[in-house]
Amino acid sequence: MDCEAAVQAAGEEDAGCTASAGGPAGRPGDQGGTGDPTSHGLLSDLEGQYGPRGPTSPGGPDTQSDPCSPPGQCGPGAPDNQGGLASPGGPGDEETMGAAAIDAPTVARALRVPGPGGYAISMTAGPENQKKIFKLTVPFRCSLEAEMARITMDDGEEQNPQQTVQREIKIKGTVLSVKWIADDFDLLRVSVGSFLEKLSVVMQNIQCIWPFIPRRVNRARRAGAEPGDPN
Amino acid sequence: MPALCEREEQPVEKAGLGRRREAPERIGVSGADAGSASPAVRRTGFLPGDTARHHRAVVLDLLQEALTEAGLTSQDIDCIAYTKGPGMGAPLVSVAVVARTVAQLWNKPLLGVNHCIGHIEMGRLITGATSPTVLYVSGGNTQVIAYSEHRYRIFGETIDIAVGNCLDRFARVLKISNDPSPGYNIEQMAKRGKKLVELPYTVKGMDVSFSGILSFIEVSVEEDVAQRMLATGECTPEDLCFSLQETVFAMLVEITERAMAHCGSQEALVVGGVGCNMRLQEMMETMCQERGARLFATDERFCIDNGAMIAQAGWEMFRAGHRTPLSESGVTQRYRTDEVEVTWRD
């Protein structure tokens, strides 16, 4: 599965850049390692409950109102990049991309990095006293997964008393959007890198335990209850 | 259906998962527990970043391994318990993230457990001690604890470094191997020591201090005093190890006895990694016998950080009605033992 991330053009107040990432889609079983669902007994448990077919297969579990591509075309992956500079993509490459969009009156020329995914990133240098902004978007298979990731990642860790790094996490549909505002590049780099490392584990965890989306969990989640809350 | 509590333990340098069944004899220390997943440590000690990376790399495999070994599925799990603190921040966060994710995926309640209380509850369960004065000694913590009015009260503690930290750094100065652990190697060498070298003995009321011992040995090395002693045969490395243990353990025994006298306690429980040390247990036993008290101690399976102890504490909390909302499921590096309201005890 690919993990796509794109840096949004920030607008006038935080001019930045546009990046897109993509690569050939992989099947869930291609991931290997801890994310390889075929190596875990949990998959057989889920298959026993919901059938072996994916969420959009006839008769299989589906996400009802959530648009979800057939398995293999999108979903959580394993972002490995830290610090915001994308590396050239390759077949099955799952790297998350982002770029630092820094306060600047103009957008710098984009740097094109060759690769199957056609990445494009750019960085602009702005006045040292301006805030540094980094934005990241990560698509998920369904809004439930995105919400789970948001809840897991949004533990208030970045809200330090000195407010040197601010982070906002939002959900729009099936997309998790994260925005950092920091005083300097080092803090930004550390914060983004740490976030991506943890998000990687979350995505692998979801992929490992939820190769398919159980129908009954979707119904339970709509109520917005805490995990394990019988109400 | 037996009640089970899966637990994720990642206080510092070890990652492990344990399960807790209703019947005490069924408590399992699965192959996925602590001790089987620890980052390689050579010369430098545990670094937070490296430890966090290690935990991220192994935690999902550990989760699957524990469930497979136990023959369980997510439906058999009642709750997810994880270490909320204290400990190093990065490793704590690394696995708290997994605990939050798993709790949501499996729709199970989440419980953030105090690592120190995990040791205490496991020690009580394994040994059968009812209300002991607890000596909790490890690489990161040194506390004398007793239960009173729904809190585990800290009667005494180290005012600087933990006793295990002192042992480890002492071993580093003397270039003693870290394999399998510095404390274990010091213990083995101390058995061959014959001469007691006077080291700083620092007890301040109910508290202890170990930094002076390190300063003494480190300064001594720089000034070649210890090297001169070793070179002239005045003492051997074994003598220094022996002297270190006798000194620090005597300090611990003193403050434990003082707490027992204060509480009128007839039970003492030793927990934590350093609690595996047989010389410490021997000295504590002598003190307890002199007081007409009883000593409880566990073996290395439960002394050292492990998954089952957090499962045990989490299970107690779960039965008492505790729940950790997702919004409060972060970590606390300085999570004090007495911050937890112990509602599962009278």
Image (tube, coloured by chain):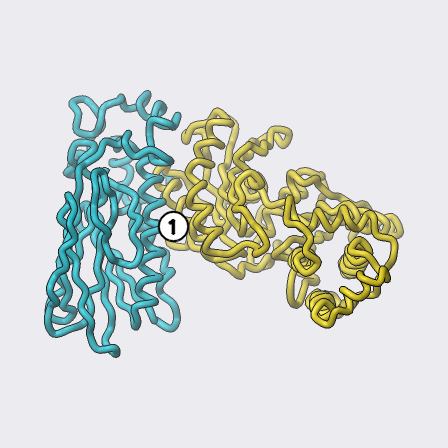
Chain colours: A cyan, B yellow
Residue B136 locus on image (x, y percent): 68, 53
Tell which residue pokes out farthest to the front in this image. Answer: B231
Subunit bearing disc 1: B
| Residue B140 versus residue A181 in the image, above or below | above
Estimate the x, y position of residue A63 in percent, counting from the top left. Answer: 20, 34
Please name the residue shown 13% across and 58% down the image.
Answer: A18
The single residue placed furthest to the right in the displayed view is B290
Would you call the spot at circle 1 few (<14 residues within 10 Å), some (14-19), or many (20 or more)? many
In the displayed structure, would residue A38 be above or below residue B207? Answer: above
Circle 1 SS class: helix
Depicted B88 relative to depicted B72: above or below:
below
Inspect this view and state whether residue A202 appears: yes
Q: Can residue A141 be seen in this view?
A: no
Left or right: B76 as drawn, with respect to B124: left
Where residue B274 appears, as percent x and y from the top left, is: 69, 50
- Specify whether B243 is left or right of A152: right
How many numbered circles are shown? 1
Q: Mark 1 points at which residue?
A: B326
The residue that appears at 20% across and 50% down in the rendered structure is: A5
In percent of width and height, residue B125 lies at 66, 39
Toward the viewer: B48 or B262? Answer: B48
Q: Residue B259's image quarter?
A: bottom right
- Residue appearing at x 71%, y 58% in the figure: B174
Residue in view at x 86 percent, y 62 percent: B234
Q: What residue type is labelled 1?
A: Leu
